Amino acid sequence: MRASDRFLPGPVLGIETSCDETAVAIVAGGVVLTNRVSSQIPVHRRFGGVVPEIASRNHLLTILPTVQLALEDVGLRGSDLAGIAVTNNPGLMGALLVGVQTAKTLAHAWQVPLLGVHHIEAHCWAVMLAPPGTASGAGDEAQDWPQPALPCLALAVSGGHTSLYRLDGAGRTELLGATLDDAAGEALDKFGKVLGLPYPAGPHIDRLAQDGDPRRYALPRGLRNRRDVAMSFSGLKTAGRLAIEAARAAGCDLSDVREQADLCASYQDAVVAQLVNTTMRAARQFELRDIVIAGGVAANSQLRADLIAACDAEGRRAWPTPAAYCTDNGAMIAGLGSSLLHAGERDDPFTLDASPTLRSSLSTRKRQRDAARLLPGS
Ligand code: KG4
Ligand code: ZN
């Protein structure tokens, strides 16, 4: 199968408002035509984290102008679209509702098919999109692009989630293991906050760690002696805070970037070691050769490099999601939406609802439908 055959050929609009980015993109045949992200990070920075009510209000202000800009980018009218996809779970409820309500209204007004998509499944599917710069309207084989072989293993690692999935197809994921407590992104952001770095701290830690000594502080590297592929970051989070407090008590000047660099390098090394070790264990255990990393933390340079090295050593193939599609974006929503619409999935613009939990995953909905078909009389 050619890569582009996984997608609807026509333009699909993707809307993402689950957290603090108002993001809109248009994807056609797996090629990203435009990818607009209106970030609220500066708005939330002074609170040290996302304030849900402020996020919803800002989504309300920016969503329609962002949709307008995306359409202008590609010279299309709303009624030209082949579909609209929107994140409807999981996320902050008020924030999700802005995107879902907008998508329902536009789909009804423009008379185009609508689909609610699962944010984490969309993160995992973003790697299937054409690499930036691929000519749009991919028609012949020469214009197609490489994709991981399915089934593959997907590590979804973001501010709110750290999970390992077996990825069988668009919206077809099976959970293999997850963190028992904090997400890796949350552990990075909290550590950075104690160190005095701006929110979100992940990218700052990534940058500072490049000049630091990862062996200066010994920090815990996850759960030992487990047969499953569970992870845990809460012990590391506490150990990181204690290391900062001990360094301060010992007279280290933590406003000095060299001191910050050693702390960041040591902490990041511990986070990445646990992610890579657990992912490789899962790949062996579930016999999956291709490994995708997705979500905001997948932008981390050490995680990308260490996973590629570990895969090379074992004859596996690493697929880090292109950096532009790691943190929250509309392209991943349009991408998964395009594949699912292509497979015949649809939602009703009058009844589609948002859910803050992982409950209404498409995989779950499919399983429920399959189960319903097996009931007598159905
Ligand atoms: O996927 P995402 O944009 O939002 C959620 O769905 O949560 O992920 C955001 C997370 C934040 O914790 C942020 O600090 C982290 O991704 N992040 C990074 C990097 N860029 C973003 N963490 C480490 N290194 C990075 N370069
Ligand atoms: Zn995300």
Image (cartoon, rainbow, N blue to C red):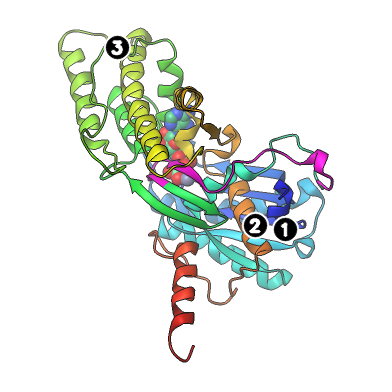
Q: Residue furthest bottom?
A: 377
Q: Residues within 10 Å of mark 3 (few under 14, many from 20)?
A: some
Q: Is disc 1 surrounded by few (<14), some (14 to 19) or many (20+) residues within 10 Å?
A: many
* Residue occupied by mark 2: 339
Residue found at x 29% / y 13%: 254
Q: Residue at x 76, y 41 (%)?
A: 144
Mark 3 and mark 2: span between their CA atoms? 44 Å
Q: Position of residue 332 (x, y in %)?
A: 59, 48
Q: Mark 1 and mark 2: span between their CA atoms? A: 6 Å
Q: Amino acid at mark 3?
A: Arg
The label on residue 342 is: none
The tag on residue 215 is: 3
Disc with the residue nearer the chain's start (1 vs 2):
1
Q: Which mark is residue 8?
A: 1
Q: Secondary structure at mark 1?
A: loop
Dot 3 falls on a residue whose secondary structure is loop
Local SS, label 2: helix
Which residue: 44% across, 42% down?
287
Q: Residues within 10 Å of mark 2 (few under 14, many from 20)?
A: many
The mark that comes first in sequence, 3 or 2, is 3
